[in-house]
Amino acid sequence: MPIDPYAPNPFADRAKLIDPVRFEQVSAVKEPPKMFAGGTSDTPAFTASGIDPELLLRLPAGVRHAAAAEPDIRVVHRWFEEFAGISEAVVDHQGWRDAQARVEDWLNNTDLDTRTPEQRAADDEAEYQSYYNPENDRVAHANEQRRRAEAGEQPLEDFNTIQGRKSWQANMPTEVTQARARPPGYSDEDLALLAQLLRGGAS
C-alpha cells in the first residue's frame, strides 16, 4: 500500500506500514507526532508569506515546511505551480527533517510501560521477593531462621529439605500433580511409590 504524500502525516503513515504491530502498541500509549508545531499540529499556526496554513495540505509533504517558512509570496506561488502535482517533490528544510526524526524517535523509543515510578518500584520489589525468599534463597533462609530464633518463633525447615521437596514436586507426573493433596497417613515414600506406579515402572 503506497504512502499518500498529500496526507496530513505521511511520516506516521509510513511508520505504520513498516512496523504495524509496534505502531499500534506505541499509539496506545501516545499518539504519533504531527508534522508541525513540535509534533502537535498538521499545519503551522501561520506562514511567513501570509498564505492560509491549510493551503499547505495541497502540496506534497516534502514541500510544506519550506513553503511555510518562505517569506516571498512569489516563490511560494511558484512552488504551488511546480510541485502541487509532483508527489515525490522535496524542498529541503530543517522542519521537514525534524518532523521525520520525531516520528522515528516516537516509534523506536517510546516506553510502553505506563506504570508510575512507585508502581515499578513495588513490582520490582515483589519480583525480587519472589526469587530471594527463604524458600528459594539460602541467604534469605538463614536470615529468616536467625530472626525466628531471636524472636522465639518456630524455626523453618532445613533449606535442603525445602529444596528437595520442591524439586520432587516439580518432577511429579501430571496425574500426581493434579491430585497433589496428600491422603491421610501417606508418607513421602508412599507418594514416591505411587508416582513410580503411574509411570508404569513398578516391578
Image: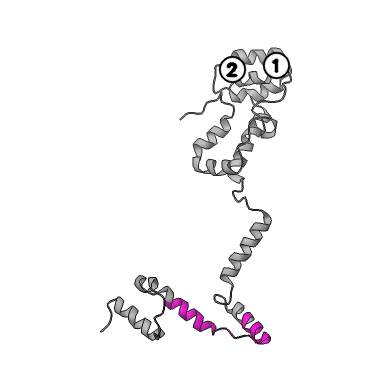
Badge 1 amino acid: Ile
Examine the rendered structure and indicate whether residue 108 appears above or below residue 84: below
**Residue found 59% across the figure and 29% down from its top:** 9
Q: Which residue range is magenta in the image?
A: 144-168
The 10 Å Cα crowd at callout 1, few under 14, some 14 to 19, many 20 or more, is some
Main SS of residues in magenta: helix
Examine the rendered structure and indicate whether residue 29 appears above or below residue 10: below
The 10 Å Cα crowd at callout 2, few under 14, some 14 to 19, many 20 or more, is some
Q: Quadrant of residue 189?
A: bottom left
Q: Residue furthest front?
A: 184
User: Is 80 in the magenta?
Assistant: no
Badge 2 amino acid: Phe
Q: Which mark is residue 130?
A: none
Percent x, y of residue 20: 50, 40
Percent x, y of residue 167: 45, 77
Badge 2 element: helix
Q: Earlier in the sequence, mark 2 or mark 1?
A: 1
- The residue that mark 2 highlights is 83
**Residue found 49% across the figure and 79% down from its top:** 163
**Residue found 64% across the figure and 58% down from its top:** 120
Q: Quadrant of the C terminus?
A: bottom left
Percent x, y of residue 83: 59, 17
Q: Nearer the viewer, residue 193 or 140?
A: 193
- The residue that mark 1 highlights is 51
Q: Quadrant of residue 121?
A: bottom right
Q: Nearer the viewer, residue 118 or 186?
A: 186
Q: Quadrant of the N terminus?
A: top left
**Residue found 56% across the figure and 25% down from its top:** 7
Badge 1 element: loop
Relative to 102, 18 lies left or right: left
Count of picture labels: 2
- The colour scheme used to paint the residues is one colour
